[in-house]
Amino acid sequence: MQMTKSVPAVERAFAMLEVLDYSRSGMNIADLSRKLAIPRSTAHTIALTLERCGYLTRDASQRNCMLSSKAYMLGRDAIRPERIATAAYRPMRKLSSQTLLTSHLAMLEQNQVVYIQKIQGPGLLCVDTYVGKRTNLHCTGVGKVLLAYAPGGFQAKVLSRGVFARYTRNTITQPSLLREELKRVLENGYALDNQEEELDIRCLAVPVFSVRGELLGALSISGTLQQLADDRLAEATLALQQTARSIARRVQDEASDVD
């Protein structure tokens, strides 16, 4: 079969998007030129075009290019939320039964968190959430996970908003402090909402990655200070991580069945 011609400019534009996807702090035009082996003028033109279309943004210094939230959201429907929610149901039931806590699975929806699955724990604590509910990024465990592992451009846009809303005395409201918190999330592999949205309530969350390493969402358990005391966090984190891997395998299995 005869091959049709490709468009070099389009190939270079996608190559630039892919390079920036792997760079959390962004890259300047000179770096992009060297990385893609193209003239600086060409790199500048492509970056400017992508920026005008809304797929790139600039950092505070206006030097580094980063993926925008629009670019990030392009692929959010590649693995549909309902498929992930269905795959997560049984592992999450087991998690809630094991920990006696309410579990949530959440994804990014524009600039907020949206819950796509919930299993109410068997205890007396009733968590005021529901599937489809939206909540904040800065003061929830799932929100911190999703923000920490999001592309640099999306994270920079969120952190550039200024002071965040305060819900309790523990809420992180300053972007600089939230930035440090997100670094700890990446170092530890989990996030903790320590009475930041509601007093006496803690939420422990971990990322859920696909078998190919794509971020599918954030998985959490919620409980009182006593239920999620410091001496329980290591055990609870392990249970969350095991459940996250189980969800990833079930998502892969269901995708294979559909194919």
Image (spheres, rainbow, N blue to C red):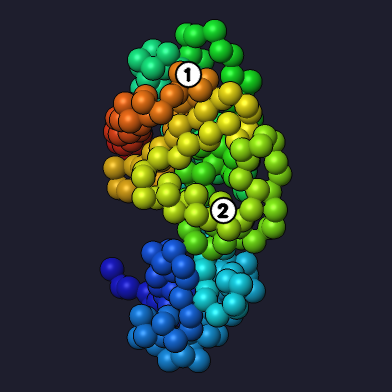
Q: Residue at x 57, y 61 (%)?
A: 156
Q: Amino acid at mark 1?
A: Gln
Q: Is residue 214 visible?
A: no
For label 2, the crowd category at 10 Å Cα-Cα, with few meaning under 14, some 14 to 19 and many 20 or more, is few
Q: Residue at x 56, y 51 (%)?
A: 178
Question: Is 126 located above or below residue 214 in the figure?
Answer: above
Left or right for 95, reference 180:
left
Q: Residue at x 49, y 9 (%)?
A: 123
Q: Nearer the viewer, residue 10 or 104?
A: 104
Identify the mark at residue 226; answer none if there is no mark.
1
Q: Residue at x 33, y 30 (%)?
A: 234
Residue 145 location, x and y as percent?
47, 43
Residue 28 location, x and y as percent?
48, 80
Locate the N terminus by quadrant: bottom left
Q: Is residue 230 visible?
A: yes
Identify the mark at residue 177; answer none if there is no mark.
2
Residue 15 location, x and y as percent?
40, 72
For numbered disc 1, what is the local secondary structure? loop
Q: Nearer the viewer, residue 43 or 5?
A: 43
